């Protein structure tokens, strides 16, 4: 190989080395720690919206916020879940996990392990009113809590009515007891007044009799004194002319 050929060969080798070095820099730049961290952050922040909204609502929703049923859940509740759940309750594979009672209203959470399905029921006097079927446990728990809150609201008037009815019955019973007590006191007062009148008559009669007896006593005493004087006079007349004893 002549001198010119060697020079060209060296130039080509150097150029190839530069290309290789530049490619390595590009690769290193793409795989540097800082961009990787950015990618990780992006995937983490986008993972939350991609998650089930029901699950996130179970974890972060305030207890007072009602759960909005989807169109499919509302349709299921109105078209067949009630009859389906009523039939399944007669079997032995359905488990009752939670139940809340408020007045005649209640909410129950059932689990059908054979199909990993949850049923959430709202009922009144043991008659199912609404039934939601879901395969999402978090969604089932959220709907159950919402149904339980609804039972509190629905039973408020019923419980207030029962309380007022009990208070009315108690008041009426107290009125009856008070009236009975008043009647007995009135009867006692009538008897007392009658007895007082009788006693007053007896007292007047006794006073009149005492006054009459007092008059009779005085008259008798006067008669006694008169009789005694008469006896003494007769005694003196009988003894007149007789010697006086010494």
Image (cartoon, rainbow, N blue to C red):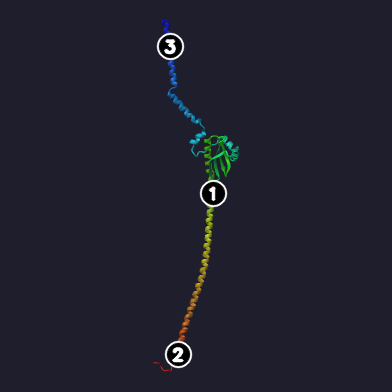
Inspect this view and state whether residue 67 appears: no
> Tag 2 or tag 3, which sits nearer the N-term?
3
Residue situated in front as seen by the camera: 162 or 10: 10
User: Residue 120 in the image: x percent, y percent?
Assistant: 55, 39
Q: CA distance from mark 1 to mark 2?
A: 105 Å
Q: Earlier in the sequence, mark 1 or mark 2?
A: 1
Front-lying residue, 138 or 53 = 138
Q: Residue at x 48, y 82 (%)?
A: 220
For the residues bearing labels 3 and 2, Cβ distance under 8 angstroms: no
Tell me the residue at 43%/18% (across/down): 24
| Residue at numbered disc 3 | 13
Q: Name above or below for residue 184 compared with residue 21.
A: below
Label 1: how many residues lie within 10 Å, few (<14), some (14-19) or many (20+)? few
Q: SS class of the residue under badge 3?
A: helix
Asked whether residue 235 appears in the rendered view, the answer is: yes
How far is mark 3 from mark 2, CA to CA? 197 Å
Q: Is residue 79 left or right of residue 61?
A: right
Query: What label sits on residue 221 in the rendered view?
Result: none
């Amino acid at each position: 190989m002549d001198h010119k050929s060697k020079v060209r060969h060296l130039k080509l080798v150097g150029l190839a080395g530069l290309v290789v070095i530049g490619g390595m820099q590009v690769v290193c730049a793409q795989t540097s720690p800082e961009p990787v961290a950015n990618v990780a952050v992006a995937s983490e922040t986008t993972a939350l919206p991609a998650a089930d909204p029901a699950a996130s609502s179970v974890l972060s929703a305030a207890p007072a916020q009602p759960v909005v049923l989807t169109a499919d859940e509302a349709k299921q509740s109105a078209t067949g879940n009630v009859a389906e759940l009523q039939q399944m309750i007669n079997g032995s594979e359905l488990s009752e996990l939670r139940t809340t009672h408020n007045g005649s209203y209640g909410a129950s959470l059932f689990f059908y392990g054979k199909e990993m399905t949850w049923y959430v029921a709202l009922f009144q006097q043991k008659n199912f009113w609404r039934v939601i079927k879901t395969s999402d446990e978090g969604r089932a728990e959220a709907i159950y809590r919402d149904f339980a809150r609804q039972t509190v609201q629905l039973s408020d008037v019923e419980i207030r009515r029962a309380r007022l009815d009990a208070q009315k019955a108690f008041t009426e019973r107290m009125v009856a007891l008070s009236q009975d007590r008043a009647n007995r006191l009135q009867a006692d007062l009538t008897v007392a007044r009658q007895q007082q009148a009788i006693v007053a008559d007896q007292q007047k009669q006794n006073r009149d009799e005492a006054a009459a007896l007092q008059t009779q006593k005085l008259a008798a005493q006067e008669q006694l004194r008169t009789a005694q004087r008469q006896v003494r006079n007769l005694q003196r007349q009988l003894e007149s002319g007789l010697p006086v004893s010494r």
